[in-house]
Image (cartoon, rainbow, N blue to C red):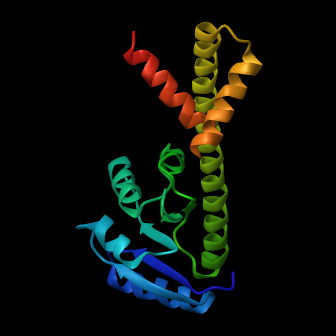
Amino acid sequence: MGAKLTVVVVEEDRDRAIAIVDALREATDCDVFVVGNSSALARRIAAHEPDIVLIDINSPTRDMLEELTLASGPIDRPVAMFVSNSAGGLAQAAVEAGVSAYVVDGLAPQRIKPVIDTAIARFRMVRQMRTELAETRRALEERKVIDRAKGLLMKVKGIDENAAYSLLRKTAMDQGRRVAEVAEALVTASELLR
């Protein structure tokens, strides 16, 4: 990574926060902001628009994990969580909550850069998959609407499927709209006329 990172560190212990900031600045070119207490955590993190959030917790509970991950916006940015103790099932809960990296045995200075790089790479991969999934769902829904509109046209006009699609496509081109938009309007209008 060549660009300068903006990192938010969530750490309540002042001395530990200073050590983390020093380790970050030594490991990579970054601007670091420390959030020392969890009041209004989501707003405080979002105010810095970080590239990544690092959370350092000794022994997280499920409630704390959920609150911190929701506040740090794992859908908006990568989140790396460093814990001292591994409690049963918390790693899986963290990943399910969107944490990009869950590291047991705390935040060791020599591991910061590889963990940040991995968290960012994993976040980008998951975001790409979410985008592709959303696009696929949208295309499937559009296909269903187009098929319903074709069925309506076939029934009302007594035409075959190809002619129905051609009519939808021609109407869309004439109106400067997408075929799915014309199909949606047709299906909506037919439901109103029932």
Q: Work out whether 25 lies above or below 132.
A: below
Along the horizontal axis of the image, is 4 left or right of 18? right
From the top left corner, tell me how far across and down residue 99 is, in percent. 52, 56
Along the horizontal axis of the image, is 159 left or right of 73? right
From the top left corner, tell me how far across and down residue 187 is, in percent. 50, 22
Residue lying at the far left in this picture: please name it. 39
Residue positioned 46% across, 17% down in the render: 190
Q: Which quadrant, please, contains the N terminus? A: bottom right
Of 2 and 18, the residue lying toward us: 2
Q: Work out whether 194 lies above or below 18.
A: above
Along the horizontal axis of the image, is 81 left or right of 13? right
Residue lying at the far front in this picture: please name it. 174
Q: Is residue 178 visible?
A: no
**In which image quadrant can residue 150 be found?**
top right
**In which image quadrant can residue 134 be found?**
top right
Along the horizontal axis of the image, is 18 left or right of 108? left
Q: How many marks?
A: 0
Q: Work out whether 95 lies above or below 138.
A: below
Q: Is residue 53 visible?
A: yes
Residue positioned 57% across, 25% down in the render: 145
From the top left corner, tell me how far across and down residue 28 is, in percent. 61, 87
Q: Work out whether 101 lies above or below 113.
A: above
Residue positioned 68% across, 20% down in the render: 164
**In which image quadrant can residue 69 be found?**
bottom left
Of 173 and 40, the residue lying toward us: 173
Of 102 and 177, the residue lying toward us: 177
Q: Which quadrant, please, contains the C terminus? A: top left
From the top left corner, tell me how far across and down residue 120 is, in percent. 62, 67
Residue positioned 58% across, 38% down in the render: 138
